[in-house]
Image (cartoon, rainbow, N blue to C red):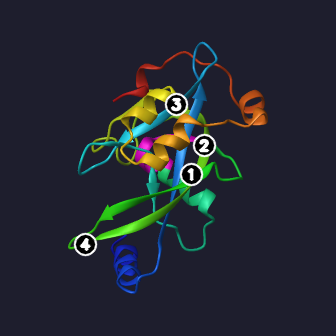
Amino acid sequence: MAATKKKVVRKARKGERIRQVAAIPFRLGEHGGVEVMLVTSISTRRFIVPKGWPMKGKSGRKAATIEAQEEAGVLGKTLKQPAGTYSYWKRLTNRFVRVDVTVYLLAVTDELANWQEAKRRQRSWLTPADAAVLIDEPDLSTLLKNLKIPQPARAGELEPRPHLASSSP
């Protein structure tokens, strides 16, 4: 992680664009409507989507899947096509850098009761409209408001499920 952050700082100093990948975990709620999961950031406690730096030797989709497991404790199938992109300003030690994020949808099949960052983050299932209100990044908020889940993912991979007690720590 430290090596990745150093590389990012070097790129930022050169004026290069910085990239990240993110996942929007989703499921069908007990009444059949789509719900998305947000997690809190570690430092500011704002609601965000699980995201991180690209990983050497892994596709953006695979990296987004790993970030969702580490940050949100969810497992599932990440859809091949990105759902969209957004940009935000990331605070580094002594500067801000512009980050472009490619977002993938993750059809959640399992929620872990214990996961890598469980003690440092909270997670919450919300309607896309409610999630959009809680997100500070305008482009991500718009992406959530206009979220379209492809029909094969809705019909083939997800069953409406009751809310689980484990969905919030």
Judging by the rendered image, the residue that carries numbered circle 3 is 128
Q: Mark 1 highlights which residue?
A: 65
Amino acid under disc 3: Pro
Q: Residues within 10 Å of mark 1 (few under 14, many from 20)?
A: many
Q: Is residue 119 magenta?
A: no
Res. 27 mark: none
Measured Cα–Cα span from mark 4 to mark 3:
32 Å
- Residue 148, how many percent across, how many down? 66, 36
From this view, report whether residue 84 is shown above or below residue 119. Answer: below
Residue 24 appears at what percent x and percent y?
54, 43
Within-10-Å neighbours for mark 4: few <14, some 14–19, many 20+: few
Q: Residue at x 53, y 35 (%)?
A: 145
Q: Nearer the viewer, residue 99 or 79?
A: 99
- Does the magenta portion include 75? yes
* Type of amino acid under label 1: Thr
Per the image, the residue denoted by label 4 is 95
Question: CA gap, disc 4 to disc 1?
Answer: 29 Å
Q: Is 61 on the left or on the right of 157, as rendered?
A: left
Q: How many marks on residues?
A: 4
Between the C-alphas of marks 3 and 1, the distance is 19 Å
The x, y position of residue 61, in whole percent, is: 62, 57
- Seen as rendered, the residue at the extreme left is 94
Residue 106: assigned label: 2
Mark 2 residue element: strand
Vertical relation: 92 (above or below) 71: below
* Extent of the magenta region: 68-76
Between circles 3 and 2, the one closer to the viewer is 3
Tell me which label, 3 or 1, sits earlier in the chain: 1
